[in-house]
Amino acid sequence: MSRDSLFQTLSELVSLHSPSGVEEAVNDHLLEILRGHGEPATDAAGNIVLRIKGRDSSRMVAVLAHKDEIAAMVKRIDEHGRLMVQKSGGSFPWVWGEGPVDVLGDRSTVSGVLSFGSRHVSDESPHKEQTERALRWRDAWVETKLGDDELAAAGVRPGSRVVPSAARKTAVRIGADGEYVGSYAIDDKGSVAGLLALAEQLSEPRCDVELVFSAREEIGCHGAAWYAERTEAEALVAFEVTPVAAEYKIEAGPDPVLVAADSYGPLHDGLGAELTAAAEAAGMAMRYAVVSNFGSDASQALRSGNVAQTACLAFACENTHGFEIAHLDGIANCVTVLERWLS
């Protein structure tokens, strides 16, 4: 898998809006690709599942990558087309910054501008204090300059999702050799791109494998919870990002990372050891992280008791839940580890 091909796949994916629960655009794209590798199915929770037959069909394991992204959500519509919004998942207005957003109505998409108010004001204006503390969603709004009838015609209502505009979601390459990619929604479109590569490369795994593109992860791992309750998988691996931060001693780069524990506690040590062995067999050094303020489909599935063993394999990602940066080889190396483990 070349950096160029991975970047192209990722660029296509990040351009497709998929806020939690409104994932149709990326669903259509994934289903079209996956039909070239088998018979993908969409379950009642919105997960897309591709089953690959293995040498031993009496056993099955699963690899999950979530396809949804963080967003904001319309709370109410005020006068003159001004939308008041709140978070959906771990989004922050100061991370997005003022600029164009897309409001996903039931019938069409409306362009707006995430706004914080003028800077040339005194203490008489409530938003003057934004210069002295972190900006909150209740301090921000979206200007559409449309009337009530126009917003209603587009199907914009309380609950409509708001995401950075497609124009802002253009992936860029940085680094001396273009080895890094930067974009919104690399969490988790980077893992989705990797899972697509795994679907293409995986041939005759040791047992049956389900590749699962899970839904609604950013708002509580809803898709994974539904899947875990019904699967016969004996082991489940979440393909994820892990934050670059000094507190975890995780640096940007190409090394795969095993999330040994997160906010919900430790994951399965034995399954983690299998992934580490697969990395070593491929000539890679596995890094380990114990991450706070973080959860994944793996920890949700393990916490529920519906899957016996779960692990989280990740690539290092800077600016998580913002304009993220990841090493393209980091994504590719996770794919290699998974392929070795499954084969």
Image: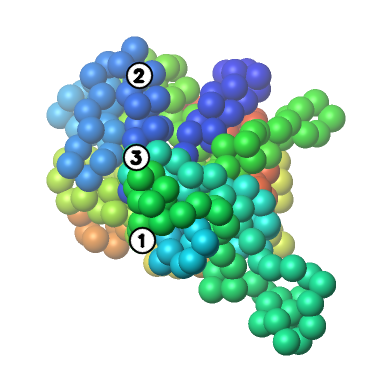
- Counting residues from the start of the chain, the first of labels 2 and 3 encountered is 2
Left or right: residue 251 versus residue 266 is right
Query: Which residue is drawn at the image coordinates 29% and 43% (left, top)?
Result: 235
Going by the image, does 106 lie left or right of 51?
Answer: right
What residue is shown at x 54% (from left), y 73% (from top)?
138
Element at badge 1? loop
Secondary element under disc 3, as helix, strand or loop, is loop
Q: CA distance from mark 2 to mark 3?
A: 23 Å
Query: Could you tell me which secondary element the residue under label 2 belongs to?
Result: helix
Indicate which disc, 1 or 2, sits on the residue closer to the N terminus.
2
Check disc 2 and give the amino acid type: Glu
Residue 92 visible: no
> Residue 238 is drawn in which quadrant?
top left
Which residue corresponds to the image point at 54% horizontal and 53% vertical from the top-left? 144
Q: Residues within 10 Å of mark 3 (few under 14, many from 20)?
A: few
- Residue 221 image point, x, y percent: 34, 54
The circle on residue 107 is 3
The mark closer to the camera, 2 or 3, is: 3
User: Which residue sits at x=64%, y=40%?
Assistant: 168
Query: Foreground mark, 1 or 2?
Result: 1
Q: Which residue is mark 2?
A: 32
Q: Amino acid at mark 1?
A: Pro
Q: Residues within 10 Å of mark 1 (few under 14, many from 20)?
A: some
Judging depth in this view, the residue of 99 and 190 nearest the camera is: 99
Q: Position of residue 180 (x, y in %)?
A: 71, 35
Q: Amino acid at mark 3?
A: Arg
Judge by depth and name the residue closer to the eye, 146 or 321: 146
